């Protein structure tokens, strides 16, 4: 008569004696973090599919496997949840940029690194569609988000301005360049390219557009 494999016999013995290892119970903070992540992921998906107005707290809760009440308890309102979602997306993008070693660059190369990171976020659509949907909602039916997006873009422009000023100080960018104006122009280029591509991804090459933008920067900003 064939004998059982040793591993099978050991497992059966462990079950019969109650010696099977139990998974450790998750802590309350771990459960909260998991439920928050699931609700934010559901919001990201639904807004990308239905838009802001077509996405309710009840729908987000249902898609995440929770109640509308839990969504409201954690985030206070739909606007609160969505702004948390935006901040999470920005944190991921910034982390990826630092992981690629881009945070230490300045001048033109720092600006090109910034563009490369933005291009990847757009191409992979890592929440970028939802980001734009919410940004435009802030101009109309969701004015509560307007101050947040305004401050966010001020920070973006300040970061670009800092990179430009560092390049001027290092002699890699022309001394007569206006850092504030250059920050506005570069932000406008990023927003415009991304919005056009989200509308018509088959209409042009995203990579070619960003490469041309980088060539323009080198031509216009180099001493």
Image (cartoon, rainbow, N blue to C red):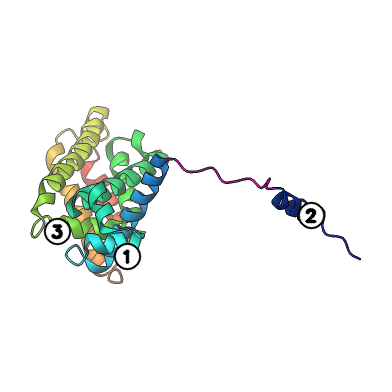
In space, the residues marked 2 and 3 are separated at their CA atoms by 63 Å
Q: Which residue is mark 2?
A: 9
Q: Quadrant of the N terminus?
A: bottom right
For mark 3, does the 10 Å Cα neighbourhood hold few (<14), some (14 to 19), or many (20 or more) residues? some
Residue 141 x/y as whole percent: 9, 60
Residue sitting farthest toward the front: 17
Q: Quadrant of residue 108?
A: top left
Q: Which residues are magenta?
A: 18-27
Name which of mark 3 and mark 1 comes first in the sequence.
3
**Residue drawn at the location 35% of the way across and 59% of the way down:** 64
Specify the label residue 205 is tagged with. Answer: 1
Q: Which residue is mark 3?
A: 136
Q: Quadrant of the C terminus?
A: top left
Name which of mark 2 and mark 1 comes first in the sequence.
2
Q: Secondary structure at mark 3?
A: helix
Name which of mark 2 and mark 3 comes first in the sequence.
2
Nearer-the-camera pick, 176 or 93: 93
Nearer-the-camera pick, 59 or 118: 59
Residue 190 x/y as whole percent: 22, 53
């Amino acid at each position: 008569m064939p004998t059982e494999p040793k591993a099978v016999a050991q497992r059966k013995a462990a079950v019969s004696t109650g010696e099977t290892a139990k998974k450790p119970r998750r802590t309350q903070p771990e459960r909260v973090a998991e439920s928050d992540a699931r609700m934010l992921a559901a919001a990201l998906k639904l807004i990308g599919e239905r838009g802001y107005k077509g996405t309710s707290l009840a729908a987000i809760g249902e898609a995440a496997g929770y109640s509308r009440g839990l969504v409201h308890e954690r985030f206070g309102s739909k606007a609160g949840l969505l702004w948390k979602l935006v901040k999470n997306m920005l944190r991921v993008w910034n982390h990826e940029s630092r992981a690629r070693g881009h945070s230490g660059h300045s001048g033109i190369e720092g600006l090109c690194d910034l563009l490369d990171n933005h291009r990847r976020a757009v191409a992979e659509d890592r929440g970028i569609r939802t980001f734009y949907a919410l940004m435009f909602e802030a101009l109309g039916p969701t004015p509560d988000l307007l101050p947040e997006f305004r401050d966010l873009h001020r920070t973006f422009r300040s970061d670009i301005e800092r990179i430009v000023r560092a390049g001027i100080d290092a002699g890699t960018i022309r001394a007569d360049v206006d850092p504030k104006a250059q920050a506005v122009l570069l932000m406008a280029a990023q927003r415009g390219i991304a919005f056009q591509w989200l509308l018509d991804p088959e209409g042009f090459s995203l990579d070619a557009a960003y490469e041309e933008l980088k060539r323009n920067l080198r031509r216009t900003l180099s001493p």
